[in-house]
Amino acid sequence: MTQGDFNLDNEWKYLIYRLGGELYGSPLLSIKEVIKVSRIKPVPYTVPHYRGIISLRGNIIGVVDLRIKFGLNPQENKYGGNVLIVENEDMMIGALVDDVDSVMALNRDDVDLSPAIETKIDTKFFIGIAKVNDSLINLIDIAGTLSNEDLRMISRNRGVL
Amino acid sequence: MVEKQDKYDMEIVKCFLNEGKELVDEFEHVLLDFDKGQKTPEMNGKLFRMMHNLKGASKTAGFPKLTDFCHSIENVLQNVRNGKLYPTKEVCSVLFKALDLLKSYLSGITVDVDFSIDTSFIEKELLFISTAVVSSEKSQQDEEKSPLNLFNPININKDVEAPSIIDNVVNVAQNNSQNNYQSESNNIVADKNNFQKKIGEVLIEQGVILEDQLEKALLVQKNAGAGPREGTSANNPTIVGSSIKEEQIRVGLWRLDSLINFIGELIIYHSMIKERTTQIKLDDSVLLEAISYIGKVVKEIQSISLSLRMIPIKSVFKKMQRTVRTISELQNKKVNFVTEGEDVELDKVVVDLIGDPLTHLIRNALDHGIETPEERVKKGKNSEATLTLKAEHKEGNVYVTVKDDGRGIDKEKIWAKAVEKGLISENKKKDFTDDEILRILTIPGFSTKDEVSEISGRGVGLDVVKTTIEGIKGTFWIDSKINEGTTFYINIPLTLSIIEGMVISLEDMKYVVPMGQLVETINNSRYITVSSTGKGRMINLRGEVIPVLDLGKMIHGNRGRCNEKISEKSEADFSGLVINYGGRKVSLEVGCIHSQQQIVIKNLGKELGDIPGVIGGFILGDGEAGLILNLPEIVKYNARLIERNNEKIAYN
């Protein structure tokens, strides 16, 4: 999915969460569920933002730390992390975030689609910035961010063997 | 038009389809044995009963057309049972054809209950054989007392006789028998005999068949033939009621998998309790005994649950018999097909996948390996070739071999072809062993259609066979000697989803290592580790000095997760896994070695597809995910990393 696929003309529901102290939002429909995880098993020879694997009802799912991926300050949550389970094409992947805030219905008028900001997030997956009350929310296409293509770069030191 | 729901009771139809498919499969198995020579009354009785059951079931489910079709198959079997029909190869062929039609009929109904196939052709053929071939043994016995002895057993050859007349006879016979199933088979035999010799001649003169003549013939048949024959059939009492089939329940694979998972957890928790008892120095003999007994029971349950996934390779072997039969008949080759180890059990998934490559190899052997009887005789071989399909357990794996005693593969030709195709340069020949030359056959692209004639067809699709086998973590290789034959070897793991593994921990994280990779384990024993010139530690293992590598450092070293506490010790309790790496022993230090157990392999996400040193994942008793490690690959990977770093240092 790309930016254009989001129907911003009407109301759209977003899941709002925190990453490194900032608010982020992603389309609610792209997130299957939110789970609390106490421990994530690291996988050797992977990039730092690939935190490892967890088990979810008998399946093993990889977890990507969005804070590290976006170059934000990871804040270790003493209650363990919240993992957003994202269903993507034919696979499931988890996204580790600081905290889940709320579900919000956003209008087209709330969103600035081409803000002049600098971010580590691939502009392809950056939807825009929503101004709600006094806070700003970065809207990102989480499914696109964690797409197959992106995940192919998980392995470190490729080609050594 | 009746509504589908009214016409069929879907529950019954479902039941019928399940039962029907089972019956048809079983029928095929028995028919194959039957065809191979086990032409005993018991076998025939089995066939008859199965078809009879199927007929009954299809009638109950409301498929009259299918019922009729089953009935005509049953007729043939009935005749065989009564001794009126000798089960020649031709008879079996027709039965096989009918069986195939039955199969497609059933699968058709699975998709659409109103499905229907034109069965008339096979039905006629069935009717034809049940009328055409008289038991040669029986007729000889009967020769003195029966007027039917005028007729010799004849072979079916529809082309020679005028088909329309046959159809006529058959039709009349059908009309005659429609009201009376019991006497139908008798009628038919008579019809056919009469047609062949007595009335047959008259028929040819007149060109028409007359009903009264036919009836006359029937009478002759009834008076003369039926009497004694019924007597013989009475000697072979049928056991219709007492089916000896084992009771079975169909269970979804996911259920088995979750059962196996839970039992795995049970084992981990049990070992946790057991560990705890030694830690707290539990001194309660009753409790300790109970805990150890639970351990035994759990292990037993585990082995049963694992065996649930295993099915014998028999079903695949039976299919191969069918292939051999068809092809050897088609190519006029005499083949004695021998199967061994049909009871060897493999994971269901593996059994399902191995069918295609095996068919391919069998076809290859029949098509290109085995010579025609004339050619074989010329070569001084037995005119009947032997094709062996064998499965056996060896070293925790299953070996399946396809062996023929045919002409073998001409390595020179392969070599020439490979050079011609530009795969290899001519002067390198001395570097290649025979085995390696044969391996050229499995190179994709080497085996395209064009080359079939040039390299006697060998190699067609062998690359596909190899890829399929490798896909199920097996290996495939070929051995061949000119004029002595070819053997295809397949080596496959027992199962894809379970491995025998050792649970270890690094710091407080658990990992699994496949047992197959371990030479031995050193569990918490006192070993003197020597640090020589700061280059690394060694331990003395029964006089053998072997290097010590820190597994924790190797897999998470760059993240600072290595186990500092242990690696600083110079003489202390040491837990390590000894593996064979490149021909020498290497020990990998770990935090703790827990237990050996069977582990259900879980697939990791696609994103981890090319991570070195990891075979798969598993789920621990506490619900945490873990990794199954590939130790030699980890050692190799680290050695490469060090090499690279050294290169970099040297470069700088």
Image (cartoon, helix red, strand yellow):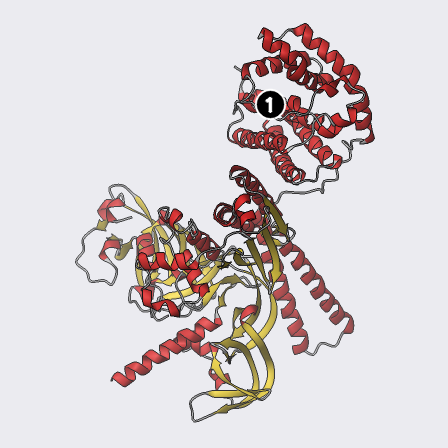
Q: Is residue B59 visible?
A: no
The answer to which image quadrant residue B280 occupies is bottom right
Q: Is residue B389 visible?
A: yes
Left or right: B231 in relation to A76? right
Left or right: A159 in relation to B8? left
Q: Position of residue B186 (x, y in %)?
A: 72, 19
Instruction: Decide: is B71 above or below B557.
Output: above
Left or right: B9 in relation to A65? right
The answer to which image quadrant residue B593 occupies is bottom right
Instruction: Decide: is A57 above or below B501.
Output: above
Residue occupying the point 60% across, 65% down: B395
Residue occupying the point 72% across, 13% down: B218
Q: Position of residue B258 (x, y in %)?
A: 58, 53
Left or right: B592 in relation to B435? right
- Between residue B257 and residue B141, name the one nearer to us: B141
Instruction: Decide: is A4 above or below B416.
Output: above
Q: Position of residue B562 (x, y in %)?
A: 45, 79
Which residue position is annotated with label 1? Answer: B63
- Between residue B408 and residue B399, name the one nearer to us: B408
Question: Given the image, what chain letter belongs to the residue carrying mark 1?
Answer: B
- Between residue B20 and residue B40, name the one nearer to us: B40
Q: Position of residue B645 (x, y in %)?
A: 32, 80
Tell me the quarter of the image containing the C terminus of chain B: bottom left
